[in-house]
Image (cartoon, rainbow, N blue to C red):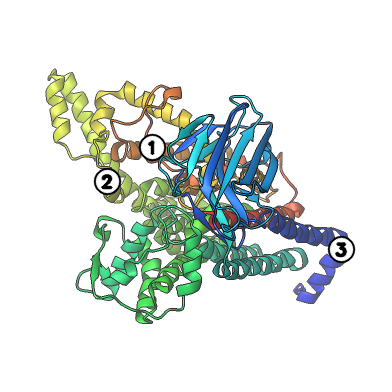
Amino acid sequence: MEKKESLAERIRKNTRHKGLVITTLVLLWINVVLGTLLMYRNSLGKISSGNEAYDNIVELVRGSKVVETVGVVDDCDALAIKLATYARRNSGKFVVTVVGNDTHKVYAAKEYDVRTIQDNAFMTVELNEPLDSSIDETINITLKSEASSGNAIGVYYSNEQAYENSILTIGDEVTEGDLSVRFLNDSEEMQKFYHLIITWVIATFTLILLLLLFIRPKYEILFLMMGIAFGLTFWLIITPMSVPDETIHYEYSFQLSNYIMRTEDHMVFNEEYQNYGAMAGHLNISAAYERFIKKINKPLSLRENDAVMRFDINESYKICFIPQALGITVSRLLKWNMLRTFYLGRLFNLIFYLVCLYTAIKKTPVHKVLFGIIATLPIFMQQAASFSYDCFINGLTFVIIAYLLKWMHQEEPISIKEFILAFIANLMIAPIKVVYGLFTLMYWFVPARNYGSKKKKILMTLIITFPAMFELVRLLGPLTMRVFKQIFRAITGQIAGSAYHLLKAETEIQTDILEPFRVDGEVYTFDDVLTKPLEMIELFLRTVRYSIKTWFYAAFGRALSGNTLILPTWIVHSLLAVLIASSIIQEKQCESLSFKIVTFLLCIFGGLMMVGGMLISWTEVEQIVIEDYGGPIIQGIQGRYFSPFLPYLFIILHNPKFNINKKFEPYIIYIFILLVYEVIVYVLSYTFMN
């Protein structure tokens, strides 16, 4: 038996063999930490106040300027101005000056290269000294640029005045509204929160990097630790109710907790638990950090009145809210306040996801680094550390594909225990969204020898794919029957009008999970698909042309929080490069070409189902026309809906003839950890300014 290498021996071995490389990487990490903190120093640990609205945008071209005259906010030492690049690469200079109207003192005169400006984000302007209303009651903020039209940045402003007695001038015209500018002040509470988070991040990330460089633990252990560190960080820095639909999911989870605690009316909870003050839906705001510091330790103080929740969990799929509901239930039994209850519900959801992550990476014999990196991407960790049921879907997706790859590549027979666990995972995911359950069809690629015989393979594969197939038939069966009815009536000569009225009388196609979110206006129906097929095809193609790039980038996390926190382009492209690199790492086994073709076709079919579902459940008939694309588009599709496809899509890229040596795996993970650190500091900077 081979002697197991001790921890001390592993450290000595790695240090001796790669001492220079390790020293270089440690120094790089130190420089990244210090450089990043220095870059964002003007916004970290501060609280902002000012104009929250950004209704309009004006392109700042050569010869024009934007001037805002506004009252001084005492002790403000920096401004944050919301700018846009129009999603293009501009060039030229951008100038900001801040001058006191009483003393004519120049508080700032800054020149920026527009290529460094982030799209749809606040840019920080540091002042030479803090503002003081006893010296200057008002200031002029002047924005200029030397760029030509189509190559200049945009400046955001509101429709209505946000500041008393302020004046906004665009060009030479006084305009109603105010510049989207915010004043940054030092805050004791914000400093506490900032130091708490940044100390945690630097300490945990440093520990993980040292483990990666010196010890090289098993990947399931390493990515579990990364999941814990990343997850707990996003658990705190993504503010309550900011994750898409988190308010709804929180109330669903609370209703399920009411069922667990046998409350008389599951739709009712105390008003204290509906106290969303200082927390904003779909926005990351610094006031939530301040509330966390001030009120996380406050005792529970129930109010006299109860509140009725808006959405009923009986119209949704309950199982995906069990982890969150258990967290809420534990908190209520401990008589914790609303904030603690909320964060404990999030924590239980994160724990469920981490169990799935650990199981998946431990079980899969290939693509461990790829799965680990995808599973710990910021968008995945954000959803896992929230009340979103995306956590449930994403976690089970990794478990399902891990068992699939294990069974495909192993030599020994499939154990009953593993079969039951894989069946349970498939059973739980199919009713949520059948689109994600479709990939259970890939289990037909498991060799018959692993089941014992061809008959056993057919029987056991039918069992494991039954949940998804049942849901698919339940969803598409009525549609198929309606199509055949219409064809039959057309063939037998019945008039099209009677067929149309028959179709109108049929039940509209919708899934339980989408019912609570249907829009109020008239939406497209399956009848439109049958009676106007060419128009629907054109609508679909237009939507794909307009949105496919956005979907792709959003799937691996270009937009965080409520799709409002847009990451810098260089981070997004770097994450994409890391994903591609991790997908072409050399593996002992490789999936067959037929496996990749079927995987790709299932992704396409799943995407079509998703787009079709949003067409007939969300897309309004009367909507704004996208002028550059010649018509309306299908509404309601978000990039994160495609996130569970990522493991399958990136497996397709793996090629035994063109790959990266496995010895580079630790360095790919190292770069990924550095990028996540950059994301976290950017999220903090964004939130402190918002």
Residue 131, image x and y in percent? 61, 56
Question: Which residue is found at the position 33% from the left and 21% from the top?
Answer: 534
Residue extending furthest top? 493
Check whether the beta carbons of the residues at disc 2 and disc 3 lie within 8 A of each other.
Answer: no
Residue 641, image x and y in percent? 44, 46
Residue 593, image x and y in percent? 58, 38
Q: Secondary structure at mark 2?
A: helix
Front residue of this view, candidates 512 and 324 = 324
Q: Which residue is mark 2?
A: 474
Of the numbered discs 3 and 1, the one sitting upstream in the chain is 3
Q: CA distance from mark 3 to mark 1?
A: 52 Å
Q: Which residue is mark 1?
A: 611
Question: Which residue is found at the position 29% from the left and 40% from the top?
Answer: 617
Q: Which residue is mark 3?
A: 19
- Neighbourhood count class around disc 2 (C-alpha, 10 Å): few under 14, some 14–19, many 20 upward: few
Q: Nearer the viewer, mark 2 or mark 1?
A: 1
**243 displayed left or right of 147:** left
Of the numbered discs 2 and 3, the one sitting upstream in the chain is 3
Quadrant of res 607: top left
Which amino acid, mark 3? Gly
Question: Which residue is found at the position 67% from the left and 65% from the top?
Answer: 205
Which amino acid, mark 1? Val
Of the numbered discs 2 and 1, the one sitting upstream in the chain is 2
Front residue of this view, candidates 217 and 280 = 280
Image vertical order of residue 303 relative to residue 186, above or below: below
Q: Quadrant of the N terminus?
A: bottom right
Check whether the beta carbons of the residues at disc 3 and disc 1 lie within 8 A of each other.
Answer: no
- Neighbourhood count class around disc 3 (C-alpha, 10 Å): few under 14, some 14–19, many 20 upward: some
Q: Secondary structure at mark 3?
A: helix
Which amino acid, mark 2? Arg
